[in-house]
Amino acid sequence: MSNNDIADHVPALVWTAEARGIVTYANLASRKYLGNPFAPNTTLHWDQFVLEDDVKKVLDAWRSALTVGESVKVNARLKRFDGKYRWHKLRLQPIFDEARVLSGACGIAMDIDDFVKAGEAYEIGERRLRFALDAARVGAWEWDMGSRTARISAQLAQIYGLDPQQAEVPLQWLFDRIPESHRAWFARELTGRLHECVPFELDFPIELEDGRRLWLRTRGETDCGTGSEIERVFGVTYDITEQHDAQTERERSEQRYRALVEASSELTWIADAAGHTNQLGNWQSFAPQGGLDAGGEWLDLVHPDDQDSAREKWSKIVRAQVPGSMTFRLRRRDGSWRTMVARAAPLHDDDGTLREWFCMATDVTAERAAAAALEERNLRLQVAMRAARMTIGYLSLDSWTACWDSEDAVPGVQAAPTALRYDAALHRVHPEDRAVVDAAMRRVALTGEFDKPLEFRIVMGDRESWLQSQAVLQRDDNGKPWRVIASAVDITQRKTLELALRETDRRKDEFLAMLAHELRNPLAPMRNAIALLRREKEAGMRSGELVGMLSRQVDHMARLVDDLLEVSRITHGRIMLRREPLLLGTAVYGALETVSSMATSRGQHLTVRLPPAPVWLHADALRLSQILVNVLNNACKYTDPGGNVCVTALADERFATVTIEDNGSGISADLLPHIFDLFAQGERTLDRAHGGLGIGLSLVKKLVELHGGSIDITSPGPGRGATVSIRLPLAVPPETPPTLHEAPPAAGPSHAERASLHVLIVDDNKDAADSLALLCESEGYHVDVAYRADDALAKAEAEPVDAALLDIGLPDTDGYELARMIRLKGEPRPMLIAVTGYGQADDHLRVQAAGFDHHLVKPVDIEYLMSLLAELSPAAASPHAE
């Protein structure tokens, strides 16, 4: 039997073709399938029987077969005799001759059309199912009970907060998402369903990693296989959180309703759609016994005079099927008639059909009586407000707009013809008070609380007024905050006097404290000198030194008193100027000569620039010198050692201007506006290094103004110096000589002598320190004196000290800190005695806290001091004696 005969018996399509694609043989199956197109003398190419879309795919497979020299397989659609195309699996085999030259091809085709279409249908079904599950937000899953893993769909992965691409997770991971409160129940229910091999449905919560809690519903079926072991479980899961929450809320709402009805003092009842009573809620405790028979209507208890109107109103509400209210009187159990306000609300089914009415009646008898009384009180209040000229304002909380009753009761508070926006009304309040007023208004609007009368300023144009306000919250009939009612009374006059009195009192206290300190400082060396003079013969001291000391301190006290008297005389207009022709240059140089000793001792540089031509003034020489010396003294005093003070004088046609500029400590912005106020000073330190009573510049300003001039002070800020400009009117009189002032002489150093006890005296006031040292030496003590804390600490470390007298106000380190450093070793010696001009109660507490043994206020009581030193026993002092 030939190969062709054998091929005719093969059910598959078999053919051969030349190398150029012309079919040379087709078996019987091919001819039947193709409709026997192979008539004699016909030449057919193989691609005539292949769907055009698949020709390229067959050619690509053919080229691959030629490359590797082996058969290849490819799926393609072939045209049947009836014109339809069916899928076939083609096997193409190249044919070579003995010289390995391609001579043709052999092809075999098997019909796979039904298989391909079934696969396509399966894929379409799978895709539709997946789309349906995704649209319904349903996640599918398959549990492999052997490997304890779960294959999950992308939708289920999203429900559990996973990456949609994650297709498999451990079963335990899914179970661990169930909260512990439900985990045991879920395991028990699931186990029972699985062992019964029945479909199951369970609702349970899960907790995601981001903290959210969801409620899920899962439905599944168990594949128990052929044995007793459970192999697989299939099912779906979907999110029912909204349904679960809605159901929970409905149940809670029902519970709240029942609790409300049971606890409420209002009367409740339910009527059907036609208005007939179905159920009376809590009427038993209100209605008289036997007054409401079974099946009776609530209208039966209404006052006879109100029954007709109540029945008519109730009928209108039922016909309209809309919420409504009515007022009537009901008889209470005690026989009294109570005024009631009843409200009815219709309840509808989902399709909008009226199902029943819910009604509630509230006893408003007391409220009606209170409303009448309130109206009467309001009338009386209006009369009182008119008499007191009080303004009432209203803040509507629904729109946050404000208006006022009248415009003439309080100056500066104008009635708004229309409602004014809250922000615009608040803008009338002074910027410094705006935040406090806003907070108070919002607090009363939110809580109804207004702690105490609120005082604030309002600004209308260039006018500023003080108001005192009270506010209350008014609610509407439903109890909702409606508006804030505020009263406003003008207290500008009282507030101005109050602030002035408070400022005067504050300055008085500060001045008295400064005056006490300034007077104690010179009194201390004076008392010491007097005590020394009494001991002069015994101590062998020279009285000349002590007299000089007394003279300097008396001069200092005299200057303090003179300054106070000057201010008093100028303030009361009792000073007269003795004007005469005066050269400006003479006055400037005279003032510079007065302060030159201070500038030299501090290493400061004084520079002067005067006009080339003489400038004449008509002024009081003594007072002009007082002006310039005071300003120059301040410039040197507030400029660091080595600093610069520059005096510049200029003149125009009418005025001469003297400018004194320094690069010293400057003036803070908050002090600058008050620099000319009486007793005004910058921040003070304990050492009072710059001293003074704070009256110098006030005195200078008044003297300049008496001369018809003006004075101005500017400063860029602390640490950046200050500039004082004095402007005086010109004159053309003959020259007058300048007035000179001498600077106080400097104190001399002290001499220490060895004795049985070592006493250390520390005070930056040299006269006070030296005089006290002389007193102690006159008693036979070995005394060391230090004017700075670091020097004192060095002396204490160099030689043991039995007693230390420490000034508190030291310029470098205050006496409190110095006492702590001396007592670092924790030894009882030395005896620490605070010697200071500060003697208030809190000063005593600070001294005690710093470790001092005694607190002495300047001027020191010498006898008491000597008694304290005498308490040091000779035995304790002997180790330090020579």
Image (cartoon, rainbow, N blue to C red):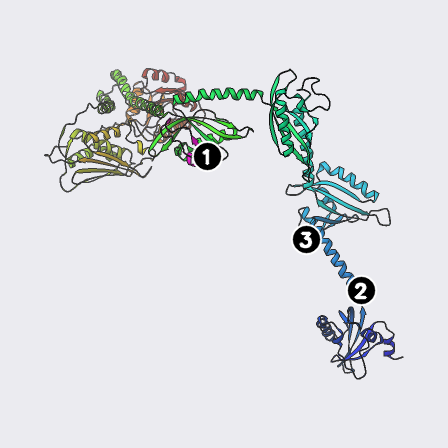
- Mark yes or no: residue 73 visible: no
Q: Secondary structure at mark 3?
A: loop
- Mark yes or no: residue 518 visible: yes
Q: Earlier in the sequence, mark 2 or mark 3?
A: 2
Q: Amino acid at mark 2?
A: Asp
The x and y percentages for residue 830 are 40, 23
In terms of depth relative to the viewer, which is nearer, 497 or 510?
A: 497
Magenta highlight on residue 128: no
Which mark, residue 114?
Answer: 2
Quarter of the image where one finds residue 491: top left
Would you place residue 873 above or below residue 633 in this image? Answer: above
The x and y percentages for residue 423 are 44, 36
Q: Amino acid at mark 3?
A: Gln
| The magenta segment | 399-426
Q: Secondary structure at mark 2?
A: helix
Q: Residues within 10 Å of mark 1 (few under 14, many from 20)?
A: some
Q: Residues within 10 Å of mark 2 (few under 14, many from 20)?
A: few
Residue annotated with mark 3: 165
Nearer the viewer's eye, disc 3 or disc 1?
Answer: 1
Between the C-alphas of marks 3 and 1, the distance is 57 Å
Marks 2 and 1 in Cβ contact (< 8 Å): no
Q: Is residue 677 left or right of residue 621?
A: right
Magenta highlight on residue 403: yes
Q: Amino acid at mark 1?
A: Thr
Q: Earlier in the sequence, mark 2 or mark 1?
A: 2
Quarter of the image where one finds residue 31: bottom right
Nearer the viewer's eye, disc 2 or disc 3?
Answer: 2
Residue annotated with mark 1: 401
Q: Secondary structure at mark 1?
A: strand
Q: Is residue 425 left or right of residue 324?
A: left
